[in-house]
Image (spheres, rainbow, N blue to C red):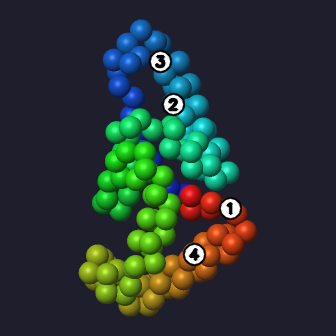
Amino acid sequence: MLLLGSVVSVSSTAYANDDTASIKQACRDLVLDYAFYRDRPDATGVVNLFTEDGVIELLGDQFVGKEPIRALPAAFVDRLAALDYDSIKNAVGDYLKNKDIERLLIRRDKILEEVERLKKIIPNFLY
């Protein structure tokens, strides 16, 4: 499964009368619900955790709203597939050596192979 990071923010006014413990529990519940729906995979369950103007940021791109969030796993795989030697080199400069970039590309290929395998056996794997 792909693990995508997300940031959760809670409006302080929404919980103005709640104590810290209930706020922490609500955040825990949200993270657990996200993991549950993402691992099933249940796109509707994941998307329903977000408001209409919910935002996920990934690799410098913002996905705003329920439908772009629903499409996020496929967009992530597309971005990964588009990575090539030149795009990585341009991003990292001299920080990585050529052989390190080649190793990254090998890992990219292995991840994409696994995604293709999972798409064949898990319905709606990328939603």
Is residue 59 depicted above or below 21 in this figure? below
Q: Foreground mark, 1 or 4?
A: 1
Question: Sequence order check: which comes first, mark 3 or mark 2?
Answer: 3
Q: Foreground mark, 3 or 2?
A: 2
Q: Residue at (39%, 29%) from the top-left corner?
A: 10
Amino acid on which the number 3 mark rests in the picture: Thr
Circle 2 Cα neighbour tier, 10 Å, few/some/many (<14 / 14–19 / ≥20): some
Left or right position of 1 against 77? right
Please name the residue that numbered disc 3 is placed on: 20
Please name the residue that numbered disc 4 is placed on: 111
Q: Is residue 1 visible?
A: no
The label shown at residue 123 is 1
Instruction: Pick the residue in front: 26 or 94.
Output: 26
Residues marked 2 and 1 touching at CB (< 8 Å): no
Question: Sequence order check: which comes first, mark 3 or mark 4?
Answer: 3
Give how far across and how far down residue 127 sits, in percent. 56, 58
Q: Residue at (38%, 13%) from the top-left corner?
A: 16
The label shown at residue 27 is 2
Left or right position of 104 against 119? left
